[in-house]
Image (cartoon, grey):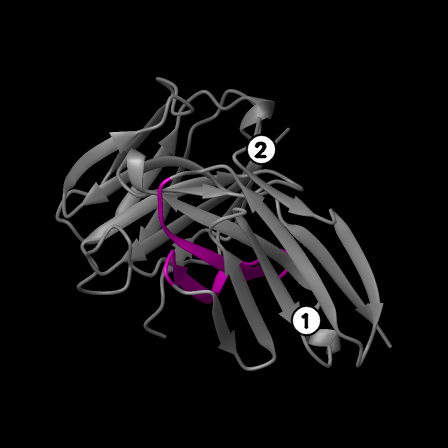
Amino acid sequence: KNQVEQSPQSLIILEGKNCTLQCNYTVSPFSNLRWYKQDTGRGPVSLTIMTFSENTKSNGRYTATLDADTKQSSLHITASQLSDSASYICVVSAKEYGNKLVFGAGTILRVKS
Amino acid sequence: DTGVSQDPRHKITKRGQNVTFRCDPISEHNRLYWYRQTLGQGPEFLTYFQNEAQLEKSRLLSDRFSAERPKGSFSTLEIQRTEQGDSAMYLCASSPGLATGELFFGEGSRLTVL
């Protein structure tokens, strides 16, 4: 079973709307949790990194939250733009395994005009 | 451009042929990682280097795969006797030092094995 589960698998929203992507993980203990944006056919680009002691971090219109007690994170995108269409990947750094990164499968977001 | 660069971006080959991918990390980044990504999945770890030393290899890295980083700068990933199951995006990433630090990915090399 994957240690990092993301939902939904895919999502379609209208331009200008907000959306929230979910990440549930079982990796414990962990060093940090990251969200990456990956455009089709490109490499992932980091959006946020949060340590276990942080519960929110923003990067422009992207806000990530972390609840270490329930082992859940979310990525909220405000006022979506067409360029937000991409795969969003949740990644947990596993302290037990030398901080190896455990990747989720990603949520594919499509923003329509 | 001072980001991670990978070459070639796309490679189409016939089954049984050998292929080699090159990764040039961000200069002064001493950690370099190779990942494989198939459609609809997140990247899977293959191997990582700290400077020129290959410190870890995944079980995914069969005997047909070999990676080098001879001078602690660029790295190559070679796949011998390619199989159709090797078709994937091969991603390289570099990091300045800490295992918990930021990873900077290249654009990837997409391999299609016919």
Residue position marked by numbered label 2 in the rendering: B87
Front residue (pair A63, A82) = A63
Residue B71 percent across, percent down from the top left: 12, 48
Q: Is residue A34 magenta?
A: yes
Give the quarter of the image for residue A18: bottom right
- With respect to residue B59, does A39 lie above or below? below
Kindly identify which residue carries mark 1.
Answer: A84
**Secondary structure of residue under mark 1:** helix
Q: Amino acid at mark 1?
A: Asp
From the viewer's perspective, is the residue at label 2 or at label 1 nearer? 1
Predominant secondary structure in magenta?
strand
The x, y position of residue B49, in whole percent, is 22, 42
- Amino acid found under the numbered disc labelled 2: Ser
* In this picture, residue B49 sits left or right of residue B93: left
Q: Residue at x 60, y 50 (%)?
A: A23
Q: Chain of mark 2?
A: B
Report the quarter where the C terminus of chain A lies.
bottom right
Q: Quadrant of residue B106?
A: bottom left
Residue depicted at x 51% and y 77%: A59
Secondary structure of residue under mark 2: loop
- Where's residue B81, x and y in %? 45, 20
Instruction: From the viewer's perspective, tell me whether residue B29 is left or right of residue B60.
Output: left
Numbered mark located on residue A100 in the image: none
Q: Do the dots labelled 2 and 1 sit on one chain?
A: no
Q: Residues within 10 Å of mark 1 (few under 14, many from 20)?
A: some
Q: Which residues are magenta?
A: A29-53
